[in-house]
Image (cartoon, grey):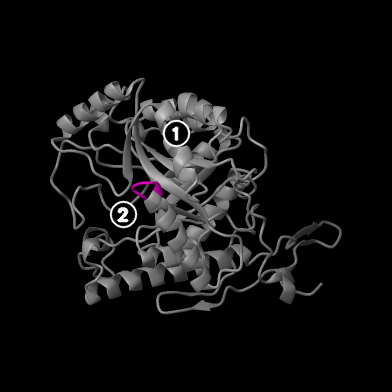
């Protein structure tokens, strides 16, 4: 893929990323609980030749508070399981990457490894995975195995808070390591299907993961043969140094949240420094900047939409990512400017679905093509191919008999 061509992803969540999206969306409020909704969104993303779509998930009901339910009844609540949504989408799409989110704080990595490997098979090599740290008491209370005190990310300079966050990310790193070992626990040629000798599998090419750490002890091998991509790409959302370090050591893609082009350049430098500190030897992280987008035909109409949404919610919408309000042409200009800061692409969060996704696919993408910033068609292949990531060698293959 030419250096001037950016990667473009879309983040799907409910009826959109604005808390009042359900009030303006033409869809029924219960649409996100139906398969048809997700199939239509995926079809629109693929119509725009987007690299991938991500699907949000969590282990507690959505809330505007970081420490538990907020008691609000005027915002969308409830969701389907992200991995199962992706599995339903897979047979109806051909090219777009499917990257569901799962918690690694309360979910066994063995279960995650088999689910994502299965998704890679049913999608023909288009699966990815975004591991997510569950850092709220509300999520912990659903499992009853541990206590997670409230965390204020604005107080990372507090030693106790910093220590807890570091532990959660260390646990996440172990979980990703277990998942990757399990993906490699079958060599690519382990299934031989030799009818003449009656041997279906070469047992010498199945391997124990043999991981023992503070949080997990997993023997392996997996029950699913090695995924078509070998290792489906792992993505991480990162806002702070501990998350950049996690991504540098464990991920293939990192979603970052700059406020402007200068901030994007600073984050890129920080991520690259984290890669050096981690001793990363594989391909560099694909860095995608997140933006919430609210689009319309003119800047005035876009601002009116945003004002109406904010009014319905009773507050100005703020996000961990920058919020863009304007036209597809102006957004294309902004992406071109930010692209020069060193990011590899963007993950756009549509404020209202399906409206803003439709505008991304049918108006923003052509504007980017006019600037020679985006491809005109899918080149074919796996999600790793689309991202320019080579298929990795199996870590156990060198120790196996020839």
Which of the labelled discs sits on residue 59, or is there none? Answer: 2
Graded by Cα atoms within 10 Å as few (under 14), some (14 to 19) or many (20 or more), the crowding at tag 1 reads some
Residue that mark 1 sits on? 333
Q: Nearer the viewer, residue 262 or 318?
A: 262
CA distance for labels 1 and 2? 37 Å
The range drawn in magenta is: 257-261
Residue 233, numbered label: none
Residue at figure coordinates x 56%, y 51% from the top left: 118
343 left or right of 5 in image: left
Q: Hey, which quadrant is residue 210 in on the image?
A: bottom right
Question: Upstream in the sequence, badge 1 or badge 2?
Answer: 2
Q: Residue furthest right?
A: 196
Pick the front one: 20 or 303: 303
Task: Give the quadrant of residue 393.
Answer: bottom right
Tell me if label 1 and label 2 are in contact, CB under 8 Å.
no
On screen, residue 381 versus residue 51, left or right, reads right
Quarter of the view holding residue 94: top right
The foreground one among 373 and 18 is: 373
């Amino acid at each position: 893929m030419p250096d001037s061509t950016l990667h473009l992803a879309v983040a799907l969540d409910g009826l959109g990323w604005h808390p009042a999206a359900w009030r303006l969306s033409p869809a029924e409020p219960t649409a996100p609980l139906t398969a048809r909704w997700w199939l239509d969104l995926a079809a629109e993303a693929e119509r725009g030749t987007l690299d991938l779509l991500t699907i949000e998930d969590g282990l507690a009901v959505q809330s505007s508070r970081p420490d538990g339910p907020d008691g609000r009844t005027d915002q969308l609540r409830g969701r389907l399981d992200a991995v199962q949504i992706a599995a339903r989408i897979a047979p109806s799409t051909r090219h777009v990457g499917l990257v569901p989110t799962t918690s690694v704080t309360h979910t066994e990595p063995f279960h995650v490894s088999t689910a994502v490997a299965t998704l890679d098979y049913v999608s023909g090599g288009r699966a990815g995975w975004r591991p997510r740290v569950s850092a709220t008491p509300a999520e912990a209370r659903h499992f009853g195995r541990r206590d997670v005190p409230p965390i204020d990310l604005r107080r990372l300079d507090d030693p106790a808070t910093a220590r807890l966050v570091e532990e959660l990310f260390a646990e996440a790193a172990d979980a990703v390591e277990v998942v990757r070992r399990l993906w490699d626990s079958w060599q690519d040629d382990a299934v031989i299907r030799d009818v003449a000798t009656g041997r279906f599998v070469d047992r010498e090419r199945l391997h124990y993961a043999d991981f023992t750490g503070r949080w997990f002890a997993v023997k392996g091998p997996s029950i699913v043969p090695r995924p078509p991509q070998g290792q489906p790409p792992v993505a991480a959302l990162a806002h702070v140094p501990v998350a950049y370090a996690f991504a540098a050591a464990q991920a293939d893609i990192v979603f970052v949240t700059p406020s402007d082009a200068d901030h994007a350049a600073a984050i890129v430098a920080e991520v690259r420094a984290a890669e050096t500190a981690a001793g990363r030897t594989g391909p560099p992280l694909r860095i995608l900047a997140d933006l919430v987008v609210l689009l319309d035909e003119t800047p005035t109409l876009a601002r009116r939409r945003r004002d109406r949404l904010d009014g319905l919610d009773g507050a100005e919408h703020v996000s961990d990512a920058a919020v863009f309000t304007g036209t597809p042409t102006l957004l294309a200009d902004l992406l071109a400017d930010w692209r020069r800061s060193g990011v590899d692409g963007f993950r756009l969060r549509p404020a209202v679905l399906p409206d803003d996704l439709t505008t991304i696919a049918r108006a923003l993408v052509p504007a980017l093509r006019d600037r020679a910033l985006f491809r005109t068609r899918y080149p074919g292949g796996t999600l790793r191919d689309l991202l320019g990531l080579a298929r990795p060698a199996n870590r156990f293959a060198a120790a196996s008999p020839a």
